[in-house]
């Protein structure tokens, strides 16, 4: 039996990946905008902003990556993307005594990290270690 998505549409691996990437797009991330927009912007998921150059603001992943690609913002790496924390998670998940995944990572961590890295590559690179903005 084939798995379906939205009725009779077969859920192929490509469609599954597209669906999970789409769902991850609403995850909140922090950006540092390089522009000012004094009024909040109304989105279907709620309001974001106001935007002040150099001041952190939380936005949906899709908006943060779009602004990064257009060099209007830098992305602040989520705390769970810290190398030391990821090493601890890896150690935990490789431990045969543990029967579960680490709770240190968000549910769609792979999709979120992939979107952030992709936006940083597209926008001129990631800069130095820990700098997810490059030239904003």
Image: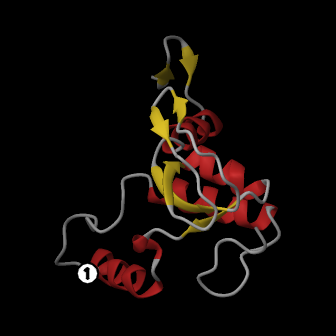
Q: Quadrant of residue 76?
A: bottom right
The quarter of the picture where the N terminus appears is top left
Residue at figure coordinates x 78%, y 60% from the top left? 71
User: Furthest-top residue in view?
Assistant: 8
Q: Is 59 left or right of 129, judged from the image as shown?
A: left
Q: Nearer the viewer, residue 46 or 89?
A: 46
Return the x and y of residue 77 as percentages of the image width and height: 52, 71
Residue at figure coordinates x 70%, y 56% from the top left? 35
Return the x and y of residue 18 as percentages of the image width and height: 61, 38
The quarter of the picture where the C terminus appears is bottom right
Query: Which residue is disc 1 drawn over?
Result: 95
Q: Nearer the viewer, residue 31 or 38?
A: 38
Q: From the viewer's perspective, is residue 117 above or below residue 48?
A: below
Q: Nearer the viewer, residue 12 or 101?
A: 101
Secondary structure of residue under mark 1:
loop
Q: From the viewer's perspective, is residue 115 above or below residue 90?
A: above
Return the x and y of residue 21 as percentages of the image width and height: 57, 43
Return the x and y of residue 98 as percentages of the image width and height: 19, 73
Q: Quadrant of residue 126?
A: bottom right
Q: Is 124 left or right of 45, judged from the image as shown?
A: right
Query: Badge 1: few (under 14), some or many (20 or more) residues near its Cα, within 10 Å?
Result: few
Q: Nearer the viewer, residue 87 or 36?
A: 36
Residue at figure coordinates x 52%, y 39% from the top left? 40
Residue at figure coordinates x 62%, y 61% from the top left? 116
């Amino acid at each position: 039996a084939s798995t379906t998505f939205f009725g009779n549409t077969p859920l192929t691996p490509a469609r599954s990946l597209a669906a999970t990437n789409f769902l991850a797009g609403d995850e909140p991330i922090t950006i540092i905008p390089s522009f000012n927009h004094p009024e909040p912007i109304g989105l279907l998921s709620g309001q974001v902003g106001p935007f002040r150059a150099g001041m952190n603001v939380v936005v949906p992943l899709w908006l943060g990556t779009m602004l990064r690609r257009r060099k209007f913002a830098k992305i602040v790496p989520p705390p769970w993307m810290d190398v030391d924390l990821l090493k601890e998670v890896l150690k935990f998940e490789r431990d045969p005594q543990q029967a579960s995944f680490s709770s240190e990572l968000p549910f769609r961590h792979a999709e979120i990290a992939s979107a952030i890295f992709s936006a940083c590559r597209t926008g001129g690179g990631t800069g130095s270690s820990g700098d997810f903005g490059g030239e904003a």
